[in-house]
Amino acid sequence: MRSKTWIWVGLAAVLILAAVNLAILTAFPVEHQHVQEPLKRVNWILPFGPGFEYRGPYGSPVIVYDGMNETWQLQNTTAWSRTLSLGDRYSLDPAHPEDIRYTPDIAIEGDKISLDFFVRNLAGEDCAQADLAVTTGIERLNATTGSPEGNILPGAATTLPIGDLAAGQWREVRVTADLPRPEPGEVLYLTIGLAAPYTITTPNGTPITFDFRRVTATIPGFNTSWKEEIDPGSTPDPDYNRAHLPGGSATFIVTGIEAPELVPPPTLRAD
């Protein structure tokens, strides 16, 4: 008798599972199911910030400011200046990644911080001269929760010239920015950005302007790519193009000497 009960339980479970699958297929037919969007890479000058630029306040390097002595000290310097492996992110052929490595070499001198960014020329043209844009932003964080408070205060925008960057070549470029002076218990979030140039000049003096429509879509792990169609009669929007220039960034926590250590929020999980 008990064996028959288990048989009916098993049949019921199979029927329920089938009904759930049917409901999913009805709501999302096969031809309309979500397909993962391929990674897109713009054929231009590509800057890359150190590998911690997207970790947020709890994973960024910490700099402690001593207002009495007007000094800044980067915590755990060795860990943040280690050599980074970029994998296939900036290889010429993602299907055959190169072993690209570089070191940020973060340094603080006086009230300035400097570090190396990675830059590669994927524009398909030799670059004799170009100006990359350096920007900074400062945001106040809640000393207890680490959440943003108030507006982001932009710093002075500067340019970083590069020259003799042949097609496919990469190099490290040094970026320097001013350090903020937080109050003793204040926590600030410093972002340093490096954006690609809008125009590059080739060795023969020809200027070439960035066009966002000229992109290559690649599927990681497959040697498959295509380009977006460009309307022969269309005219590129300069403002739209500038807003989509490739760029990289690095972020730092700058705290006053008496500021508490940021505590990450608890991780929620189902039991």
Image (tube, grey):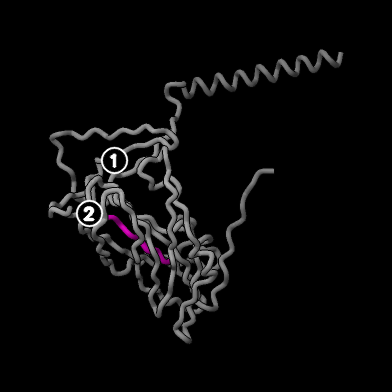
Tag 2: Cα neighbours inside 10 Å, few (<14), some, or many (≥20)?
Answer: many
Label 2: which residue?
Answer: 127
Q: Position of residue 81 (x, y in %)?
A: 48, 65
Amino acid type, label 1: Val
* Residue 197 within the magenta-colored segment of the rendering: yes
Magenta span main SS: strand
Q: Earlier in the sequence, mark 2 or mark 1?
A: 2
* Vertical arrangement, residue 173 with respect to residue 26, above or below: below
* Vertical arrangement, residue 155 with respect to residue 258, above or below: above
Q: Position of residue 201 (x, y in %)?
A: 17, 55
Give the extent of the magenta segment.
190-198
Amino acid type, label 2: Cys
Mark 2 to mark 1: distance in Å?
Answer: 18 Å
Tag 1: Cα neighbours inside 10 Å, few (<14), some, or many (≥20)?
Answer: some
Label 1: which residue?
Answer: 215
Q: Position of residue 203 (x, y in %)?
A: 16, 54
Cβ–Cβ under 8 Å for marks 2 and 1: no
Residue at figure coordinates x 43%, y 37% from the top left = 220
* Vertical arrangement, residue 107 with respect to residue 11, above or below: below
The picture quadrant where one finds residue 34 is top left
Q: Give the camera-side residue of 151 and 72.
A: 72
Location of the C terminus by quadrant is top right
Residue at figure coordinates x 57%, y 21% from the top left = 21
Q: Position of residue 164 (x, y in %)?
A: 24, 58
Secondary structure at badge 1 equals strand
* Residue 244 appears in the picture as rendered: no
- Which-is-in-front pick, marks 2 and 1? 2
